[in-house]
């Protein structure tokens, strides 16, 4: 398997150059040796001085739901590691300082984690914050590259600094089309880091290899393809499908019932890049836990489906048709006073469009132009022949 080849390359480098190094690793359950049938952290302790395991949101095994704090539990004991386990999903300044102190203790940091190719995913922002904390240090960073489950397609607008949060790292568009290693190269450039960065490349970008999905609400290969747009429902009182087996594909609310058939027929006739299939679902947690919701499952119909543009139009239409529709109020992430929809959309023009205050033509033109700029800019970070691409909307 290709990923085992990458780990073989990692072990060779560690044995020849870093056997005495104080090592840390940013990983979760996706960091697994398939051939040896064990987690990478167990093997690392045989080769280097493994000091710290840095864990993202959701916990090492993605056992926690979104926005839940993680205190390192005894249930991780079976991993049989003597390394200290530190949560990167910090909510206080004290926790942040603890992370910084632990990063300062390592000479070598291994990054081996699966992202999903969309900037809302907190693993991306946590990686960026690691690079910011290390920017003035001589730490060596070694990244095990991974294919992007959202592929090479580009969507959206690079995030301004004023919209930065744990669900948005500045400079990244909504769907960026880079592998993990290429993303790391972009972040090193963005932070002007003094650390050294080395990437262990994939042999190819085949998504048919074993690709464990990294968090509880990214359960299926379709999820990353609709996540860019459908995650915007988090900023509303409509369920984005958490608590079902197909989150982000399924969405709705108890108050959708009155317009489902009439509205769906019209929508599917006008917007033919996907089909909305009416259904009823019963979330087992999160919004409307235990309540029957009327809604839809989204079925994209073409390879060039632009998730962000489709969902922007969809949410705007639902908002205008249903008086019960509301935006989620109040601050959404630590360190920002912006609402959820502001942080997710990450752009005033897109927020205005969702509120019916901007023309479709203006938004389409802005998306096209910003995606063209990103497509040109990201070429300098590429490691493979296949390039990120913009699609026509």
Image (cartoon, rainbow, N blue to C red):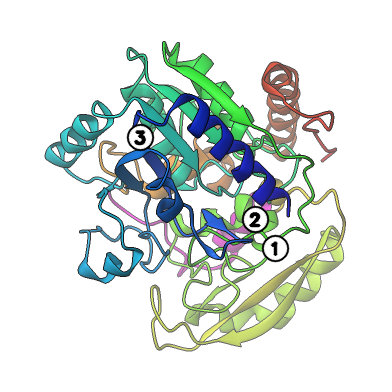
Quarter of the N terminus within the rendering:
bottom right
**Dot 2: what SS?**
helix
Circle 1/circle 2 CB separation < 8 Å: yes
Q: Residue, x 45% and y 52% (percent of image)? A: 43
Left/right of residue 292 with respect to residue 339 in the rendered view: right
Q: Is residue 380 above or below residue 206?
A: above
What's drawn in magenta, residue-wise?
311-331
Q: Which mark is residue 241?
A: none
Q: Residue, x 60% and y 74% (percent of image)? A: 246
Mark pair 2, 3: CA separation: 31 Å
Q: Residue, x 59% and y 49% (percent of image)? A: 116
Left/right of residue 107 with respect to residue 5 in the rendered view: left
Mark pair 1, 2: CA separation: 7 Å
**Dot 1: what SS?**
loop
Quarter of the C terminus within the rendering:
top right
Circle 2/circle 3 CB separation < 8 Å: no
Q: Earlier in the sequence, mark 3 or mark 1?
A: 3
Please rate how many residues cluster around mark 1, counting C-alpha atoms within 10 Å: few if below 14, some from 14 to 19, many from 20. some
Please rate how many residues cluster around mark 2, counting C-alpha atoms within 10 Å: few if below 14, some from 14 to 19, many from 20. many
Depth order, front residue of 378/271: 378
Left/right of residue 61 with respect to residue 378 in the rendered view: left
Circle 3/circle 1 CB separation < 8 Å: no
Mark 2 = which residue?
A: 224
Q: Which mark is residue 23?
A: 3
Residue 365 drawn in magenta:
no
Q: Residue, x 35% and y 28% (percent of image)? A: 21
- Asked whether residue 347 is in view, the answer is no
Mark 1 = which residue?
A: 221
Residue 185, picture quadrant? top right
């Amino acid at each position: 398997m290709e990923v085992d080849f990458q780990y073989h390359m990692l072990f060779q480098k560690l044995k020849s150059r870093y056997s005495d190094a104080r090592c840390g690793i940013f990983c979760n359950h996706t960091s697994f040796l398939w051939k040896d049938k064990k987690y990478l952290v167990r093997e690392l302790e045989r080769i280097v001085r493994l000091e710290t395991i840095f864990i993202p949101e959701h916990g090492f095994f993605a056992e926690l739901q979104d926005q839940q704090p993680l205190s390192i539990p005894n249930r991780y004991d079976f991993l049989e590691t003597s390394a200290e386990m530190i949560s990167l999903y910090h909510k206080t300044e004290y926790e942040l300082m603890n992370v910084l102190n632990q990063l300062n203790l390592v000479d070598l940091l291994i990054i081996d984690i699966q992202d999903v190719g969309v900037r809302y995913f907190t693993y991306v922002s946590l990686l960026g914050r690691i690079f910011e904390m290390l920017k003035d240090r001589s730490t060596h960073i070694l990244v095990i590259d991974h294919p992007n489950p959202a592929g090479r397609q580009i969507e959206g607008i690079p995030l301004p600094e004023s919209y930065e949060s744990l669900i948005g790292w500045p400079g990244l568009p909504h769907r960026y089309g880079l592998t993990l290693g290429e993303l790391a190269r972009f972040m090193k450039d963005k932070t002007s880091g003094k650390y050294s960065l080395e990437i262990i490349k994939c042999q190819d970008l085949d998504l048919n290899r074993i690709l464990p999905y990294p968090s509880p609400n990214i359960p299926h290969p379709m999820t990353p393809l609709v996540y860019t747009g459908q995650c915007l429902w988090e900023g509303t009182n409509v369920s984005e499908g958490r608590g079902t087996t197909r989150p982000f594909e399924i969405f709705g609310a108890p108050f959708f019932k009155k317009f489902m058939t009439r509205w769906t027929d019209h929508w599917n006739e006008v917007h033919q890049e996907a089909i909305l299939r009416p259904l009823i679902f019963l979330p087992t947690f999160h919004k409307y836990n235990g309540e029957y919701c009327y809604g839809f499952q989204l079925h994209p119909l073409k390879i060039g489906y632009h998730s962000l543009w489709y969902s922007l139009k969809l949410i705007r239409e639902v908002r205008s048709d249903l008086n019960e529709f509301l935006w989620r109020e109040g601050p959404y992430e630590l360190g920002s006073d912006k609402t959820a929809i502001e942080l997710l959309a990450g752009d005033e023009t897109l927020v205005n469009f969702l509120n019916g205050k901007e023309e479709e033509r203006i938004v389409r033109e802005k998306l096209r132009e910003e995606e063209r700029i990103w497509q040109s800019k990201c070429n300098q970070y590429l490691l493979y022949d296949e390039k990120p691409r913009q699609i026509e909307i």
